[in-house]
Amino acid sequence: MQTLFAFDGNEASNFNSDQKFLIDSMDGMYDLYLLMMSLLIEIHKKSEDQYKKLQNRLSVDANKIKPTKHLIDNQLLLKLSENKALLETIAKRKINLWDLDFEYVDIIYKNIVKSDLFSTYTKKQYPSFEDDKYFIVEIFKTIIASNDKLYDYLEDKKITWIDDLPIINTNLLKLLKQVKSNSADSYFLPELYKDDDDKQFAIQLFQKTILNKSELSQAMVGKTTNWDSDRLANIDSLLITMAICEFQRFPSIPIKVTINEYLEIAKEYSTPKSSTFINGVLDNLAKEYQNSGSLNKVGRGLM
């Protein structure tokens, strides 16, 4: 969607560079995932460093050392920090930027130890794996994912990451919530694509949306008369165009799957009323295609 939104051309334009940008952006999502994972590992390292510093102070209050030990002993953080496969992948892709940009780790760490979540967590004398996991999930949701300075940092590093961040954070949280104490190292290295067909679908959708731009746009004529042109001229128009492309050019994808997918995208990226607008347009188009027998759906696409 990002690449199509940025594309400034027509069916006759050369879009090789735009397609390369699409592929690089998709691969960049995995880098962002690894970067967010490495941030958790760096927070764990930071807690170890702080603990050592406190121990070396002769006059330090023992009550200040104990809470820091909770972070060091957190079983989920340990699982990440000792995950050889994850560490090797981060190193191989040269993802860990926190050695140079350590101030962002400091910011997150300070916000964690000042939080009520941390205060409650450190009152548990012997936290279980589930206790440790709950704490990490909550600080990720409330402190890491919502941090404005981290958001600005990621935007400066790679502009496409900002649109990818909600998806990455959602999937990372899902992994954290579902991890078990005995989960294999590979658990935290999910595949970016389900299979090669998954990657090829994204490329084909991009190509077919551009190559059939005029025809797809014509399909919307007369279907949006009750909506203001400003909304239609931007992201909503693109989402409808992509959905029509799936209706017409991807016979194995069910109509309901297409509509539901673009409604979810609209909720994330467009205006509050966009999902209602897009749902109405796509639903009417789907009925029109079905009544005229112009839908060429086969197999799973008939569902």
Image (spheres, grey):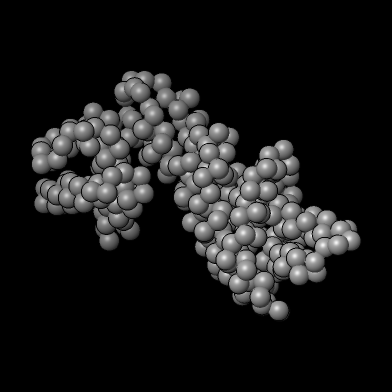
Residue at (55% x, 43% y) in the render: 149
How many tags in the picture?
0
Is 184 placed above or below 287 here? below
The image quarter containing residue 209 is: top left
Residue at (58% x, 67% y) in the render: 117
Q: Is residue 285 left or right of residue 194?
A: left
Residue at the front extreme of this rendering: 59
Location of residue 145 in the rendering, given as x and y in whole percent from the top left corner: 52, 53
Residue at (62% x, 74% y) in the render: 131
Can you say which quadrant of the picture contains the N terminus? top left
In depth, the one of 85 and 50 nearer the eye is 50
Location of residue 166 in the rendering, given as x and y in whole percent from the top left corner: 46, 50
Location of residue 80 in the rendering, given as x and y in whole percent from the top left corner: 70, 60
Residue at (83% x, 56% y) in the render: 53
In depth, the one of 16 and 63 nearer the eye is 63
Location of residue 97 in the rendering, given as x and y in whole percent from the top left corner: 68, 40
The image quarter containing residue 228 is: top left
Q: Is residue 155 visible?
A: yes
Is 222 placed above or below 47 here? above
In depth, the one of 242 and 212 nearer the eye is 242
Q: Is residue 152 left or right of residue 2?
A: right
The image quarter containing residue 59 is: bottom right
